[in-house]
Image (spheres, grey):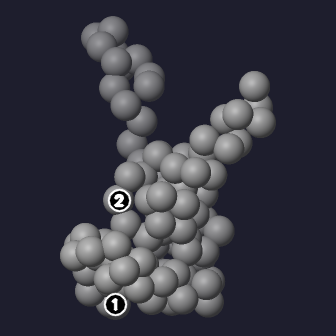
């Protein structure tokens, strides 16, 4: 955050460089439902998540996408070939290791 002239605080404006990776993603022209599957039973959900992960694995921005999802603690969908469960487990494991 930064101070503006009257002393109030304003959040920084997003920089295009921080978000342009989204324009290069393999997911760009696919329906959002592919990466944000609805829960219709454990087996069906896992199969749809695996389909999304397969697309992610060959994506040129996999690392940027995954880093973003982990940094903002994204709680929904498949990002960077990780489901919400994968990310939660990863963050928990790394938080425990940091202690």
Q: Residue furthest top?
A: 7
Rendering coords of residue 10 (x, y %): 34, 26
Q: Dot 2: within a 10 Å radius of its alpha carbon, few (fewer than 14), some, or many (20 or more) residues?
A: some
N-terminal-most mark, 2 or 1 = 1
| Crowd rating for badge 1 (residues with CA inside 10 Å; few <14, some 14–19, many 20+) | few
Residue 85 screen position, x and y as percent: 48, 58
Reading the image, the residue beneath label 1 is: 29
Numbered disc 1: secondary structure: loop
Against 20, residue 24 (above or below) is below
Q: Of residues 14 and 67, which is closer to you in this image?
A: 67
Horizontal and vertical percent position of residue 90:
63, 52
The one nearer the camera, 66 or 49, is 49
Q: Mark on residue 98? A: none
The reply, left or right, for residue 71 in relation to residue 3 is right
Q: Separation of disc 2 and disc 1 at Cα? A: 19 Å
Q: Nearer the viewer, residue 99 or 47?
A: 47
Circle 2 is placed at which residue position? Answer: 76
From the top left corner, tell me how far across and down residue 3 is, in percent.
40, 17
Question: Which residue is rendered at x = 44% and y = 25% of the image?
Answer: 1
What quarter of the picture does the C terminus occupy?
A: top right
Q: Can residue 15 be spotted in the picture?
A: yes
Q: Is residue 99 left or right of residue 13?
A: right
Residue 35 sits in quarter:
bottom left
46 shown above or below 76: below
Residue located at (35% from left, 59% from top): 76
At mark 2, the secondary structure is: loop
**Residue, x 47% and y 46% (percent of image)?**
72
Residue found 52% across the figure and 50% down from its top: 88
Compared with residue 78, is residue 7 higher up or lower down, i.e. above or below? above
**In the rendered view, does 8 fall on the left or right side of 47?**
left
**For the residues bearing labels 2 and 1, Cβ distance under 8 angstroms:** no
Which of discs 2 and 1 lies nearer the camera? The answer is 2
């Amino acid at each position: 955050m930064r101070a503006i002239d009257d002393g109030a605080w304003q959040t920084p404006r997003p920089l295009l460089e921080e978000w342009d990776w989204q324009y290069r993603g393999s997911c760009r022209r696919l329906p959002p439902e592919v990466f944000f599957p609805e829960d219709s039973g454990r087996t069906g959900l896992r199969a749809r998540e695996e389909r999304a992960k397969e697309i992610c694995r060959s994506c040129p921005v996999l690392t940027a996408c995954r880093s973003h999802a982990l940094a903002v603690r994204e709680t929904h969908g498949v990002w960077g070939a990780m489901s919400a469960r994968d990310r939660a487990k990863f963050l928990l494991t790394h938080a425990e290791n940091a202690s």
